[in-house]
Image: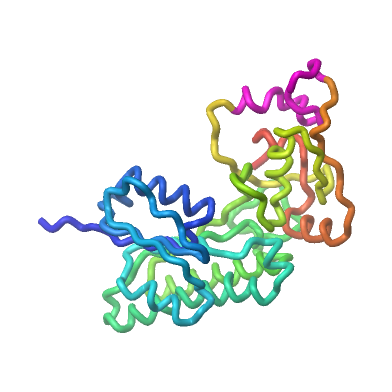
Amino acid sequence: MEIIRLKILIIGAAGMIGRKLVERLVKDGALGGAKIGQLDLVDIVEPTRPAGAPFATTTGAVDIAAAYVPPKLIAEGPDAIFLLASIVSGEAEKDFDKGYAINLDGTRNIFEAIRQRHLRTDGAYRPRVIFTSSIAVYGAPFPAVIDDEFFSTPLTSYGTQKAISELLLSDYSRRGFFEGVGIRLPTICVRPGKPNLAASGFFSNIIRLAAICRRLPHPCGDDGHRAARRPPQPDDARRLGDSRRADRGVAPDRGRGRGEAHPATARRDDRPDRCWLANQFLGQTRLGPWIYGRGQF
């Protein structure tokens, strides 16, 4: 019996989610019960080749907004395609052309390259496409719980680009060109590495800068809520200390008396441009229980 070995393509493999996905695939050596035979990793900067992978790997630096790139990526007929690449929310709002070129045109270029291969093979080629969207497709006012029937009314360019891409994913899947799966990701906190231009980046900074006892501005009010996820850490309680004290702007002990006010607190940044973008993307944001995962997700 022939053993099926998958070809997997990850577009956006150099980012946080891409790196974690690669680590998991290398660890498991399989996806959906099928062994992996080849893993192709691309991004705007060349991803790091994983060490110890039990299958063939390739890496490359590409720009999916360039029309000639997607057909090359699809030429070998990957069985599963993870489309993770995007310009983050703050950058997409600041640079209108770049946001639409990557988040919308680049996405459709990939979808269309798959469709063309599907047509050339008389429908034999029909991969699975996993697309990462965002909760930015929603728009305020928000109910207490957002369910599947809540309207998609984005209030930013980034959210609009993701919402359009979701519709394309659905339509291309409906027509049978590929099997599409869309995932609306919330804020990931704490993001590793340096801060990026995401409108929600200050959430990670609240904890990142608190760890080194630095103040930081935040552009949102104190009376809302925010859906979020963070990678679980086994020593959260030890590292973060008493979250009830942190809610009051008092960080975990760092050689200070218990309960003493700590310099690592957040202060509001009232610059109009910062406040508008953050509030359109996030809604009103609670800076207390949410931070340590005790808020309503």
Among the 4 quarters of the image, the one containing residue 120: bottom left
Q: Quick one: quadrant of the N terminus?
A: bottom left
Quarter holding the C terminus is: top right
Q: Is residue 137 left or right of residue 67?
A: right
Report the number of discs. Answer: 0
**Which residues fall within the magenta stretch?**
236-259
Q: Is residue 220 left or right of residue 13?
A: right
Percent across and percent down for residue 165 are 55, 70
At 50% from the left and 73% from the top, the residue drawn is: 64
Estimate the x, y position of residue 133 in percent, counting from the top left: 56, 60
Q: What colour scheme has been applied to the protein in the rendered image?
A: rainbow
Q: Residue 115 versus residue 215: which sits nearer the camera?
A: 215
Q: Taking 262 as reference, is 137 left or right? A: left
Q: Residue at x 76, y 36 (%)?
A: 288
In the rendered view, would you say 252 is above or below 136?
A: above
| Residue 240 within the segment the image draws in magenta | yes
Looking at the image, the residue that sits furthest to the top is 257
Residue 132 place in picture, x, y as percent = 52, 59
Q: Is residue 125 magenta?
A: no
Residue beneath the point at 77% across and 46% down: 285
Q: Between 58 and 102, which is closer to the camera in this rendering?
A: 58
Residue at the extreme left: 1
Q: Is residue 229 above or below residue 172?
A: above
The residue depicted at 73 percent of the width and 65 percent of the height is: 155
Image spot of residue 82 (x, y percent)? 43, 61
123 vs 101, nearest the viewer: 101
The vertical placement of 68 against 235, above or below, is below
